[in-house]
Every structure is written in C-alpha cells, then in structure tokens.
C-alpha cells in the first residue's frame, strides 16, 4: 500500500511540475527537493530561470521564493501608469525585481538589500536580464542614515540587530527611506525581517505618496508584538488591508507558543503578509 501512495504522490508532483513549474526553467529535481523538503549541501549555487543563468543561495529558499513570486504572484498589482515607480525594501536575490519587470517592463525600480553577499547576487541576476531602470542599493532601509549591526543568515532571514555583539554580525550601511518618498511611489514593498514597524512609524506622514503597499510583519520571539501599531499606521494613512499568513511559524499555537524550539521559523512566532490598498 505504501508503494501505491508513493507512486500516487509522485504522479501529483510530476503533474504539478509539468503544468506550472517547468515553463519557468526549473528542473524537476529542483522542484522535487523543494516539495520533499530535501536540503542538499551539494546544491549548485547557479540555476536557470526564464532561460537565463542566475545565482541563488540554496534550492529550498530559492524555490520558496519562486513559488510565492511567480506561481502565487503575491506581488501582482494593477496600475494605469506605464512606467510605475517601485521601491523594494528587502530585495534578496532579485526574484521580485525580475517579476516586477516582467509585469511592467518600463517600471523604475529602486531596490535595497542589506546583506552585501546577497546584494551582489541580486545585481548579478538583474544584469542577466539586461533590465533598465533598476537600481540595486547595498544598504538596509532604516529610520536614519548611518551604520548598524546586521546578522546575516545566508538565506532569507538576515536582519538588523541594533547593538548586537554576536560574532556573526557585520556592520552594514543604513539609509533613511523617507527621502525616497518625495515623489509618488506606485508600489512599496517592505520585507525587512522585523524592522518594518519602526520604518513605517518613521515614514507614516509620507504614506499618502504611496499607492499600494506590501509589508511582511515579523513578530520576534520574546519581544512585544506591535501588529496593532503597524495596522494603525496603515489605517491613519487611508489604507485598507488584507492579511494572510506568510509562514506557518507554529503548527499548534496553544501547544507550542512557550517552546521556541517548536517554531518552524526559529526566531519569529508570527509572520504575516499584509496587502494595503486604497479603497
């Protein structure tokens, strides 16, 4: 019986790959490792996307982003502006930039990525597509210009650490986002691993110059939750919002909330995708 089940799920996996994934240039082994949560230390750090050779960090995180961005199209939006201004805070390896440019080829994009290694990969990937009007800035968006301690994780979860004395922390440049909101921004994306509330509080008086806003909210283990502050900023700025779970941090919240070792994301006990729009 177990062999029949394995074969059944293999067929489902194969069907999904052929129907939705293959057209992106993803190989079946890449997709299969993702579906079966196989972390392969020997994964090549290069792959092919839409016929272009690009670089990645690891297959699992890469495929998670591919599924979210190109299959679920979490950032899909509509605008009458043929050359929208898009600001991407937390661009990672640049998959979101590739998506935005496919959606609006004449868009102007300003992208921030704090991790210097990942920012280099992001620039490389964007260059493979010969996109114009894409500026990748190796800096963390913050409330002030300067430098801060940053804890990289060679994946999706590098974050500002304030005055951290961790031996793994590095110093990164910070740029205040507020000056970038002097003209109208069609789409603002904020995915900065826990720094989003402070950032939004700093730019709240300029959010009237933002048409659509996507923000991923992160609740850090052991820290006061500030989702209420974030939502108040959005409401005061005239946004309505829709909220979806970004990542299942706890499978059984009532059983696991006291045991951070049970958290699937490790450092966060809640991650939400928040879509803010004008009614």
Image (cartoon, rainbow, N blue to C red):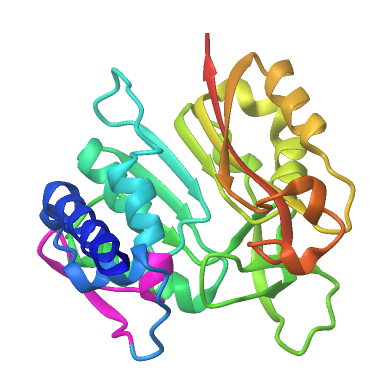
- Quick check: 200 above or below 255? above
Image-quadrant location for residue 126: bottom left
- Quick check: 73 above or below 172? above
Q: Is residue 143 found left or right of 94 in the rendered image?
A: right
x and y percent of residue 78 in the render?
Answer: 32, 23
Q: Is residue 45 magenta?
A: yes
Q: Is residue 23 found left or right of 44 in the rendered image?
A: left
x and y percent of residue 52 in the render?
Answer: 14, 66
Q: Which residue does the image show at 84% across and 43% down from the upper left?
A: 225
Numbered circles on residues, count: 0
x and y percent of residue 39 in the render?
Answer: 43, 79
- Quick check: 77 above or below 25? above
Foreground pick, 272 / 233:
272
Q: Is residue 195 visible?
A: no
Extent of the magenta region: 43-62
Q: Quadrant of the N terminus?
A: bottom left
Q: Is residue 115 magenta?
A: no
- Quick check: 203 above or below 97? above
x and y percent of residue 192 in the render?
Answer: 61, 54
Q: Which residue does the image show at 39% across and 37% down from the upper left?
A: 75
Foreground pick, 73 / 54:
73
Residue at the farthest front position? 1
Q: Which residue does the image show at 69% across and 46% down from the upper left?
A: 196
Q: Is residue 88 visible?
A: yes
Foreground pick, 145 / 223:
223
Q: Is residue 88 found left or right of 161 in the rendered image?
A: left
Foreground pick, 140 / 242:
242
Q: Which residue does the image show at 28% across and 52% down from the upper left?
A: 98
């Amino acid at each position: 019986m177990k062999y029949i089940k394995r074969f059944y799920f293999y067929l489902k996996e194969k069907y999904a790959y052929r129907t939705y994934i293959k057209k992106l240039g993803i190989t079946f082994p890449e997709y299969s490792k993702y579906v079966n949560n196989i972390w392969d230390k020997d994964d090549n750090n290069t792959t092919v996307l839409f016929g272009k050779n690009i670089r990645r960090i690891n297959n699992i995180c890469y495929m998670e982003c591919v599924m979210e961005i190109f299959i679920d199209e979490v950032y899909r939006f509509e605008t009458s502006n043929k050359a929208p201004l898009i600001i991407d805070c937390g661009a990672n390896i640049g998959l979101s930039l590739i998506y935005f440019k496919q959606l609006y080829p004449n868009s102007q994009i300003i992208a921030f990525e704090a991790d210097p290694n990942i920012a280099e990969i992001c620039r490389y990937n964007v260059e493979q597509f010969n996109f114009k009007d894409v500026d990748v800035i190796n800096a963390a968006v913050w409330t002030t210009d300067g430098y801060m301690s940053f804890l990289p994780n060679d994946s999706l979860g590098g974050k500002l650490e304030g005055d951290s004395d961790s031996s793994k922390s590095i110093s990164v440049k910070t740029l205040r986002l507020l000056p970038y909101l002097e003209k109208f921004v069609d789409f603002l994306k904020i995915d900065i691993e826990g720094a989003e509330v402070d950032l939004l509080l700093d730019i709240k008086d300029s959010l009237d110059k933002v048409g659509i806003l996507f923000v991923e909210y992160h609740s850090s283990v052991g820290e006061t939750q500030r989702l209420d502050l974030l939502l108040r900023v959005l409401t005061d700025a005239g946004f309505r919002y829709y909220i979806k779970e970004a990542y299942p941090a706890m499978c059984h919240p009532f059983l696991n909330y006291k045991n951070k070792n049970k958290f699937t994301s490790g450092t966060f006990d809640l991650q939400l995708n928040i879509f803010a729009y004008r009614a």
